[in-house]
Image (tube, rainbow, N blue to C red):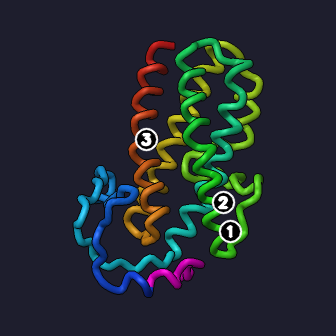
């Protein structure tokens, strides 16, 4: 088990706490389900806020996974033909870039090394191989659009598997909320990309 750098705060949360009038508090739902906003005055149950190994695996795996998505979306503007593909790529970059920063800072607070840029070489969880990436770089127009969508659908489905594992075994509030966002947001993007792919 990995102890959170913020574990000292856990002792202050020994009993139920009451939600005050300040910033809204999000209460996570079931895995894959929506969260909800706690009501003012609602008593929240005590929770162990320490990170566990599943949380660390999620962050350490998702950072290089997101970085490869950034690399793939970076190829779109100069190569894609379909405006829908460009729109999808912009949305992916808009979402995943700040998530990388959050996970990087979270790992740093734990004293964990941030995975380097070569960490995605294993190709797990739907990640593109070096051969895939070279073929994508060489493609143009409709051929690029088809390849990008096929690779990114597989990539997103892998990220959703990672998020599902975090939702099943994680414990850290921030990583659980991020996993919920990844699972729901990338699920929506997969559906959209499949629709686009059918038109190309």
User: Residue 165, can we see it?
Assistant: no
Residue 57, image quadrant: bottom right
Q: What whole-number distance in Å separates the C-alpha atoms at marks 2 and 1?
A: 6 Å
Q: Which residue is mark 3?
A: 185
Residue in view at x 42 percent, y 48 percent:
183
Q: Quadrant of residue 151?
A: top right
- Residue 199 location (% of width, % of height): 46, 13
The structure residue drawn at horizontal position 28% and vertical position 79%, both measured from the top left corner, is 16
Front-lying residue, 31 or 133 = 31
Q: CA distance from mark 1 to mark 3?
A: 25 Å
Q: Earlier in the sequence, mark 1 or mark 3?
A: 1
Q: Does the segment drawn in magenta span residue 5?
A: yes
Callouts 2 and 3 close, C-beta under 8 Å: no
Find the magenta span and give its range.
Answer: 1-10
Query: Residue under circle 1?
Result: 108
Instruction: Name the disc covering residue 104, or none.
Output: 2
Q: Is residue 57 visible?
A: yes
Q: Residue at x 67, y 24 (%)?
A: 76
Q: Mark 2 to mark 3: distance in Å?
A: 20 Å
């Amino acid at each position: 088990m990995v102890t959170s750098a913020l574990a000292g705060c856990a002792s202050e949360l020994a009993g139920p706490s009451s939600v005050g009038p300040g910033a809204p508090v999000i209460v996570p739902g079931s895995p894959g389900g929506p969260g909800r906003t706690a009501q003012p005055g609602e008593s929240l149950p005590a929770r162990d806020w320490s990170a566990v190994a599943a949380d660390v695996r999620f962050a350490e795996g998702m950072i290089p996974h997101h970085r490869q998505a950034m690399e793939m979306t970076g190829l779109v503007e100069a190569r894609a033909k379909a405006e829908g593909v460009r729109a999808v790529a912009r949305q992916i970059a808009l979402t995943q870039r700040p998530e990388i920063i959050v996970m990087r800072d979270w790992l740093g607070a734990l004293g964990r090394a941030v995975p380097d840029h070569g960490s995605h070489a294993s190709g797990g969880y739907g990640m593109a191989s070096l051969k895939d990436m070279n073929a994508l770089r060489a493609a143009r127009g409709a051929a690029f659009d088809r390849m990008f969508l096929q690779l990114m659908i597989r990539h997103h489905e892998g990220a959703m598997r990672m998020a599902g594992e975090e939702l099943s075994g994680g414990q850290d509030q921030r990583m659980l909320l991020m996993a919920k966002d990844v699972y729901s947001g990338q699920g929506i993007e997969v559906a959209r990309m499949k629709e686009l792919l059918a038109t190309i």
